[in-house]
Image: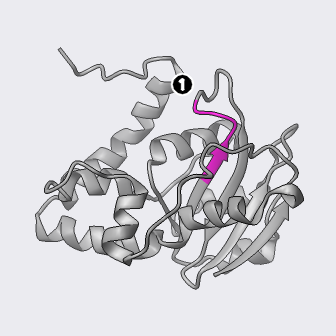
Amino acid sequence: MKIHKIQGDISSEVANSFIDSVAIDTEATGLLIPERDKLSLVQICNEDGDVYIIQPDRKSYKMPNLTSVLENEKIQKIGHFLRFDKSALEYFLKCKMKNIFCTKIASKLCRTYTDTHGLKSLVQEFCNKKLDKNQGSSDWNKNIDELTNKQLEYAANDVIYLHKIKHELEKMLIREDRLAIYKKCTDFLDTRIELDQKGFKFSIFEH
């Protein structure tokens, strides 16, 4: 794993290097976006294991090169719990993230033998690695050069395994004949995010 720290935006060369897919995750000042918290970091990873940890300009959030990747329908964006990350990226970068694969949604649809669907459980099962999630509650708004090695490793671990996990979950969805219903769930994600941003964070389908 090679970690690249970037301030502002990825270069056009890096953006053009993503062909088929990119793993993506974000860190924020908290979970209340957009009403209180802000996007702090964006982590992306290619299939070769190169991780780019990007600290956006929090005054403008102008990231045209990253935005071009997010909006490119030919590049699949793989994330875990994209309900949060897609919402944050679209809100702050003023873009529309296209062609996604959410490992949390996929896990809930095909791993019905367990009730644990966090990234830590998926990494343990499919990659035989044990993640240390202790850095999750960190100050991610520090200057990127002030982030500790443990923070950088934590941020990188949130994307480095996603390509492998996506591959395994997709096989399970096909095996269980649930790929079609999975796709319907991801199609609904835009509506679910809009409900979140309008304050309807609870399930409107409950009795």
**The C terminus sits in image quarter:** top left
Residue 128 in view here: yes
Percent position of residue 27, x then y:
65, 47
Asked if the magenta segment contains residue 164, the reply would be: no
166 relative to 1 in the view: left or right: left
Query: What's the amino acid at mark 1?
Result: Gln
Q: Residue furthest bottom?
A: 48
Percent position of residue 156, x then y:
63, 66
- Is 126 drawn above or below residue 65 in the view shown? below
Give whichever of 101, 43 is nearer the camera.
43
**The N terminus sits in image quarter:** bottom right
Asked if the magenta segment contains residue 27, the reply would be: yes
Mark 1, secondary structure of its residue: helix
Give whichever of 39, 21 is nearer the camera.
39
Residue at the spot 44% in from the left edge and 69% down from the top edge: 130
- Color encoding of the figure: one colour
Residue at the spot 66% in from the left edge and 73% down from the top edge: 51
| Occupied quadrant, residue 12 | bottom right
Q: Which residues are magenta?
A: 26-31
Residue 8 in view here: no
64 relative to 153 in the view: left or right: right
Disc 1: CA contacts within 10 A as few (<14), some (14-19) or many (>=20): some
- Is 80 drawn above or below residue 194 in the view shown? below
Percent position of residue 161, x then y:
48, 72
According to the picture, the residue beneath numbered tag 1 turns out to be 197
Residue at the spot 78% in from the left edge and 60% down from the top edge: 148
- Is 88 drawn above or below residue 134 in the view shown? above
167 relative to 26 in the view: left or right: left
Percent position of residue 200, x then y:
43, 18
Residue at the spot 80% in from the left edge and 43% down from the top edge: 141
